[in-house]
Amino acid sequence: MARVELIMPKMGESVSEATIITWSKNIGDMVELDETIVEIATDKVDSEVPSTHEGKLVEMLYEADDLVQVGDAFAILETEGGDETPVTTETATPAATKVVEETVTKAVETTTTTITNTADRFYSPLVRSMASEEGIEMTELETIPGTGKDGRVTKSDMVSYLKTRGTSPAATPTKTETKAAPAPKAEAPKHTPVNIPNTGDTEIVEMDRMRKLISAHMTMSKQTSAHITSFVEADMTNIVNWRNSVKVDFKNREGQNITFTPIIIEAIAKAVKDFPMINVSVDGTNIHIHKNINIGMAAALPDGNLIVPVIKECQNKNLVGITKSVNDLATRARGGQLKPDDIQGGTITMTNVGTFGNLMGTPIINQPQVAIMACGVIKKKPVVLELAEGDVIAIRHMMFLSLSYDHRVVDGALGGQFVRRVADYLEQFDTTQTV
């Protein structure tokens, strides 16, 4: 018999870790080749990990809600035959895993406080390491609200807490009275959950995992970026009439609909070429200027949650190509079939609040991007047109565009010019083109 490690596979660009949601197999179960053995979560996408070997599951190296790094072993199978490289017990047992964790703890012990599990609450190795590096003692760690299983503190909980913890430096090696840092603790009441009395006439439901992630990400974005929003109104009449004239033929030829979303995305891509400093990300005091225009498309899911698949390299796609990408991603998003790569690498985001009949919106920036555009409902209204013969009032299809941008790196002039340029491209749409 041979023992084989199952390795956490690479799941997409920039994805370096995954959280185990649930095990599909139990210790002692037989696992077929390519059979799902564990379900994992990366950011907003859930995925199934298939087994790369056939055999009996003999060890689970992680529990549900634990974080696993890409390339690390997460389970051990016992297989028939001896041609596989055996896995020694010393490198695979939970006891050995604990030794590795203790080694990591000792490595930071020279400058930080050691954090250990208590009988009341479990802390993963990653959380303990983060707490030690930041000088967080056990008494402070126990006050951090946890969104994981059974109230466990997760990586995202730690990140959110550290952003609002205060500006005090990390703890010094000596355990002095000042190490408790009164200033951070003074901030705690601001973030303590409000105790809402249950009078019996309310229903209490817990946020699902995705809603917790969205909550943490949106809160982090508001705390990180200096949000400002600019508005313009675009005349969509020519686009509405053009789409009405081609949508039937396009559906018959391509087998899918052409909507306003890809037309707007094409205009955004053109405007980004004119104003490349909108297509950037912020890393501390560094600005990353992206060459590819990867536009995220916020999509509502059937359960009411939100996900943002990304149309990659829009600068290289024509309207038909963007339309097919939009339809494909939207269909797979609704069916829960998105892959981790599908939501990675966005450089600017677009959200269509008009789908729900909203006139306009002030969206929250999708970090680490610096801009997100909201498109309102296309609505008929009387508009003053300036003609050579004089001004007239006409019925036009109008739409509000709103751009929320990060005022740390995007000034009002750039943000205002960009959203105006998007409206210009929409109003100058070539109605003679065929698709």
Image: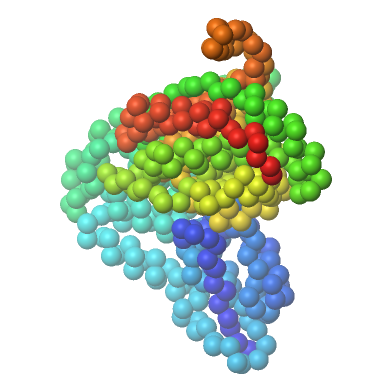
Q: Report how many numbered discs are placed on residues in the image.
A: 0
Can the viewer see residue 252 in this picture? Answer: yes
Q: Is residue 232 above or below residue 174?
A: above
419 and 26: which is toward the camera: 419
How far across and down, in percent of the image, does residue 289 sit?
36, 48
Residue shown at the point (76%, 43%) measured from the top left: 250
Residue 196 in view of the camera:
no
Q: Residue 195 at what x, y percent from top left?
A: 51, 25
Q: Quadrant of the C terminus?
A: top right
Q: Quadrant of residue 143?
A: top left
Q: Quadrant of residue 409?
A: top left
Please tell me which residue is depicted at 36% across the width and 53% down the height of the picture: 130
Question: Where in the figure is residue 426, as x and y percent of width and height?
Answer: 56, 31
**Residue shown at 52% from the left, 66% from the top:** 10
Task: Give above or below for 186 relative to 146.
Answer: above
Quarter of the image for the N terminus: give it.
Answer: bottom right
Residue found 34% across the figure and 27% down from its top: 413
Pick the residue in front: 192 or 291.
Answer: 291
The relative height of residue 66 versus residue 253 in the rendered view (above or below) is: below
